[in-house]
């Protein structure tokens, strides 16, 4: 039996055991390669022009390397530990450490570079698909074709060769540091000595939950409470991050054991098979994996949160465009508007014109603001009800329009109550009778504050009594053009784009497209990073479970001898995996939910649908790994007797 | 009337080309309340015999029934069901689950039966007090001694009132004090509760606690010794003598 034979045998055996590792490796290479190809692809130039796409992709490819690198190194530590007995045996029969290192290197080399070739091939074929998805999302019409970039190939080869060297270095130090005896012991020492729960752990458990709760509570008030300045905001955010992450760590370190122990105590020693397999095992293991689980949870939360936010933004691009630009086209100067309208007439596109003249005044709204500390008056623009469709107010009534999501968080106003409009000399008492999200003026005019709509007579009175300091240069007239035939909107936009009109002039379609393009690209990149992280963290949990199942194999032997069937055990395992995979997922989802909730209104108009869609997709993909691990357990249980 | 009856059992390992017959037609009957020891040199097939008698391994030929229920032809699921209700086990290496406390370990076999909870707690208290482990009930296996572990394992074997208890070298990992302690407890349980025990051992001292010892050599029953009214000391001497003839290792 030659050394080559041993290498070959090991390789075959390993392939069977580590198919997921090989899969993850192939996947990482493929993803990385297609990402880098994208960066060099000439058809990206168009996207790059408008959004600096190549730079964004380049930056995220660095992040991708970091994720993949951590994953590969971590996976390697698990696998080398699993093989420590084999390494010890080789040493026992007289192979030198150098020789063993040679075997391992050769083996890894074949495995690693074999996967790389496959990965690059898949990446090459996949890059077109990815590019097609990207263009579809951001709405660019370019025909994509297969593009092979030698630069991308070289870059991928270099990155993964460095990774390979790192892994080899790790293996080398591992072999060097271990004696034969310790090698035999590595796999037999369980991760965790089983001891009773100490008071310290109970405190830690309670503290963990408290910290997470504190962080959530802070995040909920982040933007809605008293207005914070930039620096305070940053400190609060850091405090939230710190308390939630530390809380998560302590949660795994103590709370899980603590809660499970409470459940166990209540059973008074009479445990069902499900509880035997799940509670007792998780209680002890989660503690020792606390750091790993914290990292997995935090980054999952990050991925889900960012995906949700970018999807919210993408999803509500249209609604947001409508909210911030009330009509299809908006102009501040009459001659610019007239040029556009003339062109529309020429093209025979039907339209309606709106003309609004905002007045700028100050409003004393302290009586209707929920938590106002400041005595400051609210800067606001005023319109007459005759300038706004579908509204007819009596003198003395005011409606706030354009009271959108963001402004709702910053200034919280009751639906009804007395307010005072201040002109230069006189003050007019009015009654607020309602608020609405519907916008009537672009942000350019309102500066983000709600627009007060008043009766025509009051408007006239205010117009006589204006404070000249508050009036804005050139922003006193708003001309809106509404295209009555919605099928013609795109044509009208083409006209708008062709004319290259002088600013300030805005188009709803342009706003929406810009939003979609930039958010689409961000969503795409975040999506792929999220997917990579999902797969790597799923793999890590799966490897952990693979190890755990083998360490607990003797338990299954005992239980089966006692008369538990394979079905009994498998049900218990399913229950256990529900926790093992479920707890990090639920904690991650809950973190991201609170993160998204605290600031989503800056990104769009719709919270529920996009967030729920992202969460469901993430959960489904994630559960694949839970199912795979159950499948592995099934095999171990079957072999245990 | 036998509680366990084995007829012409054969056990063959390996495939057609490379056969090894470990059990070569063993007939065996055990009556209720007996404490039977199985002895024999290494490789004689005593552990294999215990495994097939206890349904953990299957026979190649022959039949075994316990309390009139023949189980050699049963399916895996039925076998598990059968073990659950009729059999108890004590192993050389205790086989306790590290993650469970003493009490949880002992109550494990009851958790699959439909015994009411309070009854289970009473049962535990009774058995644990008899075996002297009641005070340890909230400790984990890593916190107690080998002898205590083995008594826990014994308590687990007795807790669901099985028809037969199989013990595989129960004293193998214990010092002599803990060993005689455990054997004393086992024979107490045997006489008090009429529990049937079948024990594999290579230790003549352990075997001397039995009421009958069966000697196996090369997969066949070589001879049997009945204790009858003899004192344990003289039974011990008989066992040593027979073991000498058998070619076993002299103590």
Image: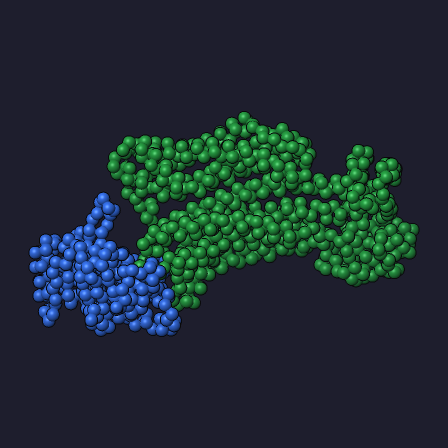
Here the colouring is by chain
Instruction: Give left or right: position of A146 versus A157.
Output: right
Task: Tell which of A96 and B45 is nearer to you.
Answer: B45
Quadrant placement of the N terminus of chain A = top left
Q: Colour of chain A?
A: green
The residue lying furthest to the top in this view is A150
Relative to B150, A491 lies left or right: right
Locate residue A4, reporting x and y percent: 32, 31
Chain the render paints blue: B
Of residues B148 and A533, the one drawn nearer to the viewer in this rendering? A533
Residue A272, relative to residue A233: is it above or below? below
The number of numbered discs placed on residues in the rendered structure image is 0
The image quarter in which residue A78 lies: top left
Q: Does residue A44 lie above or below A447 as drawn?
A: above
- Residue A592 in view in this figure: no
Q: Quadrant of the C terminus of chain A?
A: bottom left
Q: Is residue B198 left or right of residue A371?
A: left
Q: Nearer the viewer, residue A220 or A275?
A: A275
- Measured as percent of width and height from the top left, residue A69 is found at 48, 38
Q: Is residue B37 above or below residue A76?
A: below
- Residue at 69% in and 48% down: A316
Residue at 44% of width from left, 32% of height from top?
A: A113
Residue shown at the point (8%, 62%) measured from the top left: B237
Q: Is residue A104 visible?
A: yes
Residue appearing at x 72%, y 48% in the figure: A319
- List x then y, in percent, for residue B228: 11, 70
């Amino acid at each position: 039996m030659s050394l080559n034979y041993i290498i070959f045998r090991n390789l075959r055996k390993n392939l069977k055991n580590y198919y997921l590792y090989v899969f993850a490796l192939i996947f990482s290479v493929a993803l990385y390669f297609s990402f880098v190809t994208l960066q060099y692809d000439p058809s990206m130039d168009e996207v790059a022009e408008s959004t600096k796409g190549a730079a964004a992709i380049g930056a995220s490819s660095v992040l991708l390397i970091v994720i993949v690198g951590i994953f590969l190194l971590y996976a390697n530590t698990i696998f080398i530990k699993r093989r420590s007995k084999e390494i010890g045996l080789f040493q026992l029969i007289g192979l030198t450490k150098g020789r063993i290192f040679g075997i391992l290197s050769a083996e890894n080399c074949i495995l690693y570079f074999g996967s790389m070739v496959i990965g690059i091939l898949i990446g090459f074929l996949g890059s077109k698909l990815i590019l097609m998805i990207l263009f579809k999302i951001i709405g660019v019409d370019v025909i994509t074709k297969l593009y092979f970039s030698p630069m991308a190939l070289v870059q991928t080869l270099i990155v993964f060769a460095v990774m390979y060297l790192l892994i080899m270095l790790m293996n080398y130090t591992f072999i060097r540091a271990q004696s034969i005896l310790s090698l035999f012991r590595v796999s037999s020492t369980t991760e965790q000595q089983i001891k009773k729960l100490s008071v310290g752990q109970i405190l830690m458990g309670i503290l963990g939950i408290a910290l997470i709760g504190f962080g959530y509570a802070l995040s909920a008030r982040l933007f809605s409470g008293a207005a914070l300045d930039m620096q305070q905001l940053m400190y609060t955010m850091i405090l939230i991050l710190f308390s939630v992450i530390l809380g998560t760590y302590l949660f795994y370190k103590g709370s899980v054991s603590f809660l499970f122990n409470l459940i166990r105590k209540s059973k008074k020693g009479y445990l069902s098979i499900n509880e035997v397999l799940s509670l007792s095992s998780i209680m002890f293991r989660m503690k020792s994996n606390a750091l790993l689980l914290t990292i997995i949870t935090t980054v999952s939360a990050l991925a889900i949160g960012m995906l949700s936010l970018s999807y919210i933004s993408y999803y509500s691009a249209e609604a947001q465009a409508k909210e911030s630009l009330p009509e299809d086209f908006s102009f501040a100067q009459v001659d610019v508007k007239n040029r556009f309208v003339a062109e529309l007439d020429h093209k025979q596109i039907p339209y309606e014109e709106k003309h609004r003249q905002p007045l700028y005044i100050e409003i004393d709204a302290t009586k209707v603001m929920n938590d106002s500390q400041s005595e400051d008056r609210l800067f606001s623009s005023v319109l007459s009800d005759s300038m706004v469709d579908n509204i007819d107010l009596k003198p003395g009534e005011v409606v706030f329009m354009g009271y959108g999501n963001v402004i709702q968080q910053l200034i919280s106003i009751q639906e009804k109550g007395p307010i005072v409009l201040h002109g230069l000399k006189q003050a007019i008492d009015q009654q607020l009778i309602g608020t609405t999200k519907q916008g009537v003026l672009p942000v350019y005019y309102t500066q983000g504050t709600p627009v007060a709509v008043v009766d025509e007579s009051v408007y006239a009175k205010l117009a006589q009594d204006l404070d000249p300091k508050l009036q804005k240069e050139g922003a006193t007239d708003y001309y809106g053009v509404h295209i009555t035939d919605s099928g013609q909107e795109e044509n009208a936009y083409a006209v708008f784009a062709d004319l290259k009109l002088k600013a300030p002039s805005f188009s709803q379609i342009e706003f929406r497209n810009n939003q979609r393009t930039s958010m689409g690209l961000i969503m795409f990149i975040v999506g792929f990073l999220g997917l990579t992280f999902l797969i790597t963290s799923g793999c890590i949990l799966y490897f952990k479970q693979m190890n755990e199942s083998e360490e607990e194999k003797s338990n299954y032997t005992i239980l089966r001898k006692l008369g538990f069937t394979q079905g009994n055990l498998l049900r218990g395992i399913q229950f256990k995996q529900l926790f093992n995979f479920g707890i990090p997922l639920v904690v991650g989802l809950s973190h991201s939910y609170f993160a998204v909730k605290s600031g989503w209104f800056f990104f769009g108009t719709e919270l529920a649908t996009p967030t729920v869609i992202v969460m469901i997709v993430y959960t489904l993909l994630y559960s694949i790994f839970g199912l795979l691990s159950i499948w592995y357990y099934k095999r171990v249980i079957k072999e245990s007797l | 009337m036998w509680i366990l009856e084995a007829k012409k059992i054969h056990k063959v390992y390996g495939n057609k080309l490379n056969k090894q017959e470990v059990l070569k037609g063993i007939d065996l009957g055990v009556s209720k309340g007996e404490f039977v020891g199985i002895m024999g040199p290494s490789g004689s097939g005593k552990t294999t015999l215990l495994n097939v008698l206890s349904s953990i391994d299957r026979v190649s030929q022959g039949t075994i029934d316990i309390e009139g229920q023949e189980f050699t032809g049963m399916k895996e699921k039925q076998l598990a069901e059968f073990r659950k209700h009729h059999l108890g086990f004590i192993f050389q290496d205790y086989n306790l689950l590290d993650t469970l406390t003493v009490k949880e370990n002992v109550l494990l076999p009851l958790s699959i039966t439909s015994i009411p909870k309070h009854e289970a707690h009473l049962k535990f208290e009774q058995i644990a007090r008899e075996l002297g482990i009641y005070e340890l009930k909230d400790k984990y296996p890593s916190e107690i001694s080998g002898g205590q572990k083995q008594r826990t394992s014994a308590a687990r074997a007795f807790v669901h009132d099985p028809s037969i208890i199989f013990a595989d070298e129960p004293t193998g990992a214990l010092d002599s004090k803990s060993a005689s302690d455990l054997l004393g407890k086992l024979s107490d349980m045997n006489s008090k509760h009429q529990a049937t025990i079948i024990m594999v051992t290579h230790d003549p001292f352990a075997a001397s606690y039995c009421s009958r010892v069966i000697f196996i050599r090369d997969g066949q029953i070589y001879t049997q010794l009945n204790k009858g009214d003899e004192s344990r000391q003289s039974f011990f001497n008989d066992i040593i003598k027979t073991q000498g003839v058998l070619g076993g290792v002299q103590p």
